[in-house]
Amino acid sequence: MMRKLVFATNNAHKLEEIRAILGEKVEILSLKDIHCDTDIPETADTLEGNAALKAEFIYKHYGLDCFADDTGLEVEALGGAPGVYSARYAGGEGHDSEANMKKLLKELSGETNRKAQFRTAICLIEGGEEHLFEGVVKGEIIEEKRGNSGFGYDPVFVPEGFSQTFAELGAEIKNQISHRARAVQCLCEYLSRK
């Protein structure tokens, strides 16, 4: 019987990406699938902390094996910002990718150090045991948006070893090299050993 795991997210893009990466190995259930419509607070000051808060909420209230992630864009010239506040960088409610990118590009205006990295932390709770996994992809922030696929900061981030942004590379390539792909790979390796 295929193993089932709840992915504690309401982000349809993330869900799609994770299902594409995991393929047939694990059946991924969404919060909608388990009838959870609670907006789980992300109040920790680290990516690992937020991932753990979300996974612990699902395990405590639903008793299901689950995992949650949190991802941040860490820009060297900004001292690691926006980091844990990446989704809410421009302020306001919800995730306004356009406003977030606009603010980021403005903050980096005239800056020659454009080094950045995307970092994903995943917290898995299985049988009550908590495990943390991390994935990082280094790159740089370009000066203007390019590309139409992806989400978040994808149009302004060029991963190391490539000349195109995540938004230009498309989902298939991004899902092989991204921070989330690397964190999920660590999760998969762990799951396959069990």
Image (spheres, helix red, strand yellow):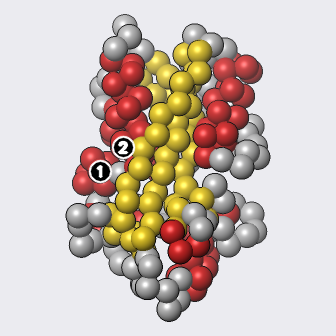
Which label is found at residue 177? 1
**Disc 2 designates what residue?**
181
Please name the amino acid that badge 2 sits on. Answer: Ala
Residue 114 drawn above or below residue 172: below
Mark 1–mark 2 CB contact (< 8 Å): yes
Neighbour class for label 1 at 10 Å: few (<14), some, many (≥20)?
Answer: some
Please name the amino acid that badge 1 sits on. Answer: Ile
Could one spot residue 19 in this view of the protein?
A: no
Depth check, front residue: 39 or 137? 137
- Residue 47 in the figure: left or right of residue 43: left
- Residue 87 in the figure: left or right of residue 132: right
Q: Position of residue 43 (x, y in %)?
A: 76, 46
Q: Residue at x 29, y 50 (%)?
A: 177
Residue 19: name its quadrant: top left
Q: Position of residue 30 (x, y in %)?
A: 54, 33
Neighbour class for label 2 at 10 Å: few (<14), some, many (≥20)?
Answer: many
Residue 99: name its quadrant: bottom right
Mark 1 → mark 2, Cα distance in angstroms:
6 Å
